[in-house]
Amino acid sequence: MRKLLVLLLIFLSGFSNLLSQNAVTDSLLTALENSKNEIEKTQILNAISDYYKSSDPKRMKEYAQKALQLSQKIRFKSEEGNAFLNLGISNIITGDYSKALDYFSKAKLIFENELSIGSTEDFKNKSGLARTFGSMGVVFSEQSNYAKALQFHLKAVTIYEELQDEEKLARVFNNIGVVYRAQNEDFKALEYFTKAQKLQEKTGDKTVGITCTNIGNLYLKQKNFDKAEANYAIAKLFFDKSPNPRGLGELYNNLGVFYKETSNPSKAFENWNLALQTFETIDDKFGKSDTYLLMGQLLFDQKKYDDALVHAKKAAELSYELRVFEGTALAESLLSSIYEKQHKPNEAFSHFKLFKAAQDSLMNHENIRKSVQAEMNYEFEKKEALQKKELEKKELVLSEKSKRQTLITLFIALLTLLIIGIAFLFYNRFQLKKTLTLQKELAEYEQKALHLQMNPHFVFNCLGSISSFIVQNGTDSAIKYLSKFSKLMRLTLEYSKESLIPIDKEMESLQNYLELEQLRFNNVFDFKITKSSDIEDDMAIPPLLLQPFVENAIIHGLIPKKENGTISIDFSLDKENLICTILDDGIGFEKSKEIKENLVAIHKSMALDITKKRLEMMEASTAQKAKVEIKEIKDNEGEIQGTKVVLNLPIQYIK
């Protein structure tokens, strides 16, 4: 079944009767037209934007933009935060999660700043911050990043409990239940759905029918049919009191599944027909597609192949129209099975091919979604770090401007006195030296920050490898893999505290990493790591500097190669430079680039960009050249023999 609940409960106000909502909106528009006060206008614009969220996301965005412009003009921070929040919610509705997170980050920063300076509107700012956390939780939940979703939902819970806002607390409890249900933690999900239901019944919340449906679905999954039926009945009562066609249609679909599971096919079809009628009132093609598929599958199970064919075709038609790959794959699989039972092998084979095509599209879509999710999470964390750094820079600039102004004033006042002028000159030199020292330290901190960006990238890749290894190689091999991975993580965490580590430590880290990759790829390559005897024990290198190049050599050079390959890493000295050489006998980067361009989904790696930035920071901190060269190795006939990466680094020592 499709996800229903997160989008219904995220916005913390719920669906109301449309006529009533229109009346409220008209009243607010009249108040806006008559208002002469810009503070009041900003509040009304945000209120109008909020009311349009359940009916017209474009208008919601339009009024939020107006509220943002006016609030920034009059410097009304609380309403500026609410405007960013409404813009974020409008982008959730339209599915642009990246923009939504960007707006939520801005709203979060404003609300936190206002709370830190002790604004007179602390209650509003706390409520706005809680809504922001809850909304961010929904974005991460929709992107299947459940750990972050829970993190932000629980932050929202803490604030709502402090404010004793039970209505909004119930919505967050429901969304937490959705997260746990998605992770198959049914008991935790049931705990939070039950909390939400009790609060919703207490406050008269109209979305309680959705929560009861959730609870019924959990009991149905556990084969507890009595409790499932009881909760579905309660949900039906609430939907009768507070109409919600989409929620009611999903309830009928779930009741159909319930009666199918309890061997009552006539009641199942009765409820699915009611679902079709309900979805038809709001032209919900997603809902109808699900319903036709459920009916077709049961008719197939009953060996009513002609009737099953009619419903399966309708499900397939809607899925193709909506470009829902999962629904398309299920419908085509069912059509193939029906034609096979009707002894029509040509049609069965034709629809089986369509099923495989839809399945491939679904897998590609999922891979792209995961790649976008990882990149979005990376960008979100990067933006949060940059916001903090930007504030620090502004404070530093203001401080420097203040000092400079003081020096200029002092110079003008004491220009006529030679001795004081000489004293000023010495003072100015002292300040210059101090500034240069600060710039050098800043460059070192930036280099360390860039190294810390490498760690999540590295861990992300390793966890992906572990997941693949467990699927492909079995439990015993996976335990061995995890043991080596834990050792590598201990080394990585140890190195993350330092901007420089001994070369021997880097070699040890590369040794562990390459052994992991050997395990992962069934020893399809050999490796060796060598070091010149001229290299001293206290010579150092930034940690994890070579790992991205080694990873690229394996993934894009050796793995596509049909036979076993070799990778070698060498550390040597050339005058005042440390030379790090990575040599593989893979397919070469031009062939690798050609392969990647032919793929449907290409993950954009940021590791090499980060490494190049680290080299720039190394140049800034050492005042010496640091560069990387990548070239293909060819034989006399021009055939590609592999790839060679050479890092030319300034010699550094452990202090």
Image: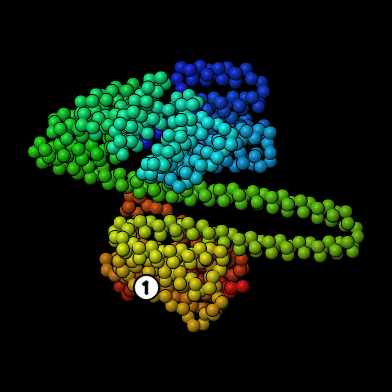
Q: Residues within 10 Å of mark 1 (few under 14, many from 20)?
A: some
Q: Nearer the viewer, residue 247 or 559?
A: 247
Q: Image quarter for residue 641?
A: bottom left
Residue 508 visible in the picture: yes
Q: Residue furthest left?
A: 343
Q: Secondary structure at mark 1?
A: strand
Q: Image quarter for residue 485?
A: bottom left
Q: Nearer the viewer, residue 65 or 496?
A: 496
Q: Nearer the viewer, residue 338 or 137?
A: 137
Report x, y in % for residue 351: 18, 40
Question: What colouring method underlies this structural image?
Answer: rainbow
Residue under the point 42% across and 21% down: 242
What is the quadrant of the C terminus in the image? bottom right
**Placement of 428 over or under 3, stated as above or below:** below
In this figure, which residue is indicated by the disc labeled 1? 527
**Placement of 417 over or under 536, stated as above or below:** above
Q: Is residue 548 left or right of residue 340?
A: right
Report x, y in % for residue 402: 76, 51
Residue under the point 26% across and 26% down: 272
Say what amino acid the circle numbered 1 marks. Answer: Phe
Q: Is residue 435 left or right of residue 574?
A: right
What is the quadrant of the N terminus in the image? top left
Residue under the point 48% across and 17% down: 20
Report x, y in % for residue 593: 36, 59
Report x, y in % for residue 516: 37, 66
Residue under the point 61% across and 49% down: 388
Q: How many marks?
A: 1
**Placement of 71 over or under 541, stated as above or below:** above
Q: Is residue 205 left or right of residue 47?
A: left
